[in-house]
């Protein structure tokens, strides 16, 4: 079987010079060949092998600590038609519930619960209810201010979504966060749709409650299966990315499940992980070249 190992430099760097590619070819099962995707930023290495994990491990050893990410998969099924993404700490750099908590001086307390839930130490649903209860009385109007002042988009995210859509793919933001955030953020990035939880309010103030049922790990998995079925796609045509424990089932079900700057348990379980590169890495992994990426 032909495996392709896509090699992507750390964000903002161009590390894949001829010497490094030669070293990686020498480490891979012979015969191996490399093909550049975007100058010294991204390249493919093709090798005849049957064990993607083993090939990844061999190449990581040959990298000798260079900040280059590796995504290994069968070459024949790399192009994806359906993309699902987590939002907080994946498509954006923040956890929205933590930013809301900052308004009532509880960011440290809420952030600790968030971190434990994302590591899988707490069940997601009760942890979310506990955190939302602490937000009671916050004015809904602060959301727009938070988005404008505090939320940053993850580099490469918009290019990833817009390029996939330009080539016929369908994209969905599937978050354990809240519709008041996923609505405007998904529109800014360019997603086809968004799914998340609904914060309940009393007048213009948060009530401290979230609508049931809560969108968590199972709902993310269900969304992938539902959309895959709706579009009649084989599983290998699906791609998912996330960082937390509530993403694990979705990542496991996807044809390619990728952990982005993820908690250790998530990184270990996913098909691939991004520790250094930005989200355009998921385009290179599908075989897109630099000049095919939609940046507007």
Image (tube, grey):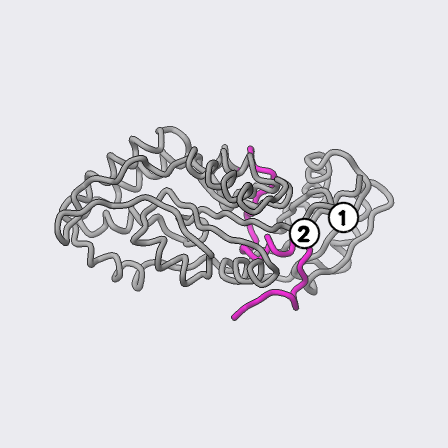
Q: Are marks 2 and 1 in contact (CB under 8 Å)?
A: yes
Lateral position of residue 247 relative to residue 18, left or right: left
The stretch in magenta equals: 267-296
Q: Secondary structure at mark 1?
A: helix
- Taking the spot 35% from the left edge, 29% from the top edge, the residue there is 123
Instruction: Return the x and y of residue 111 as percentages of the image width and height.
Output: 30, 42
Estimate how packed mark 1 is, as few (under 14), some (14 to 19) or many (20 or more) residues with alpha carbons within 10 Å: many
Total count of labels: 2
Q: CA distance from mark 2 to mark 1?
A: 10 Å
Q: Which mark is residue 171?
A: none
Lateral position of residue 86 relative to residue 277, left or right: left
Residue that lies at the very extreme toward the right in this rendered image: 31
Q: Secondary structure at mark 2?
A: strand
Q: Earlier in the sequence, mark 2 or mark 1?
A: 2
Front residue (pair 276, 75): 75
Residue named by callout 1: 24
Instruction: Return the x and y of residue 94 as percentages of the image width and height.
Output: 37, 51
Residue 96, relative to residue 51: is it above or below?
below
Residue named by callout 2: 7
Estimate how packed mark 2 is, as few (under 14), some (14 to 19) or many (20 or more) residues with alpha carbons within 10 Å: many
Residue that lies at the very extreme toward the bottom in this rendered image: 296
Asked if residue 275 lies in the magenta stretch, the reply is yes
Asked if residue 12 lies in the magenta stretch, the reply is no
Q: Nearer the viewer, mark 2 or mark 1?
A: 2
């Amino acid at each position: 079987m032909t495996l392709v190992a896509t090699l992507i430099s750390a964000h903002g760097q161009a590390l894949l010079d001829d010497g490094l590619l030669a070293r990686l070819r020498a480490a891979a099962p012979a015969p191996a060949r490399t093909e550049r995707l975007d100058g010294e930023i991204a390249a493919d290495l093709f090798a005849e092998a049957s064990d993607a994990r083993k090939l990844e491990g061999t190449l990581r050893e040959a990298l000798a600590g260079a900040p280059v990410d590796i995504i290994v998969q069968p070459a024949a099924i790399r192009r994806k038609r359906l993309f699902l993404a987590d939002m907080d700490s994946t498509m954006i750099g923040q956890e929205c519930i933590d930013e809301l908590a900052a308004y009532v001086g509880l960011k440290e307390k809420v952030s600790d619960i968030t971190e434990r839930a994302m590591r899988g130490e707490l069940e997601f649903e009760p942890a979310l209810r506990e955190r939302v209860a602490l937000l009671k009385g916050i004015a809904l109007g602060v959301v727009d201010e938070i988005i404008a002042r505090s939320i940053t988009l993850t580099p490469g995210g918009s290019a990833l979504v817009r390029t996939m859509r330009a080539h016929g793919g369908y994209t969905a933001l599937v978050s354990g966060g809240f519709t008041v955030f996923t609505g405007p953020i998904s529109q800014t990035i360019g997603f086809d749709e968004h799914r998340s939880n609904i914060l309940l309010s009393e007048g213009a103030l948060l009530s401290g409650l979230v609508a049931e049922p809560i969108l968590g790990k199972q709902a993310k998995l269900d969304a992938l299966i539902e959309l895959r079925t709706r579009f009649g796609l084989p599983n290998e045509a699906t791609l998912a990315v996330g960082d937390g424990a509530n993403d694990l089932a979705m990542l496991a079900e996807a044809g390619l499940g990728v952990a982005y700057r993820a908690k250790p348990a998530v990184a270990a379980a996913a098909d691939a992980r991004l520790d250094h590169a930005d989200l355009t890495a998921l385009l290179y992994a599908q075989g897109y070249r630099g000049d095919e990426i939609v940046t507007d």
